Image: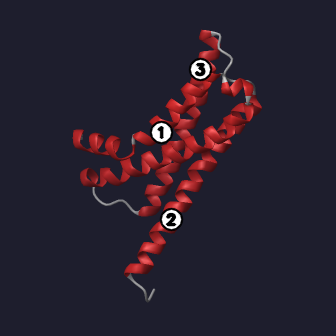
Amino acid sequence: MKKWIKSTLAEAGWAPFSVFCVYAVAAKGFNAYCLYPWLDMPTHYIGGITITYFFLAAIRNSERLIGSTPRIIQFLLAVGLTAITAEAWEFLEYLSDYFLATNINLRVKDTLCDLFFGLLGSITTIAYAAIKVRVASKRRNPGT
């Protein structure tokens, strides 16, 4: 289990961590999200891409522990875990506003937009991964 966690963090942990760091510096260091509110959309989109990438790596690396998992199950699981992560993020924004008097969560429309772009990023990642798998399969088996 330790090996699975270490290998997943080493392989893909950098991606969501990088997005979070850029977000934190932009938000706290430069007040970028107040000055340029449109930055929220690409941030959630890229966040959806990177967290799905992380979950795909985690699922693939877990096969050493649990055995082979069909690709479609890996893809659906990664999207589902990304959706849960995006929802948890929005819930934490709400709790921050409620308990810490921040003003992160602007309104319902903002929350739905954040969730939409996070899931769009996730679906983009899955589409790319599916195309990559298909191209690799055709290279291995040119007659199919």
Residue to which mark 3 is pinned: 28
Residue 7, horizontal then vertical, whole percent: 28, 45
- Nearest the eye: 40 or 90: 40
Residue type for callout 2? Ala
**Mark closer to the chain start, 1 or 2:** 1
User: In the image shown, does 42 or 129 lie closer to the viewer?
Assistant: 42
**Residue 119 coordinates in the image, percent (x, y):** 61, 46
Horizontal relation, residue 88 to residue 41: left or right: left
Q: Is residue 17 above or below residue 50?
A: above
- Residue beneath disc 2: 130
Quarter of the picture holding the C terminus: bottom left
Q: Nearer the viewer, mark 3 or mark 2?
A: 3
Q: Nearer the viewer, residue 5 or 37?
A: 37
* Amino acid beneath label 3: Lys
Residue density around tag 3, few if under 14, some if 14–19, many if 20 or more, within 10 Å: few
Q: Secondary structure at mark 2?
A: helix
Give the residue pinned by disc 1: 16
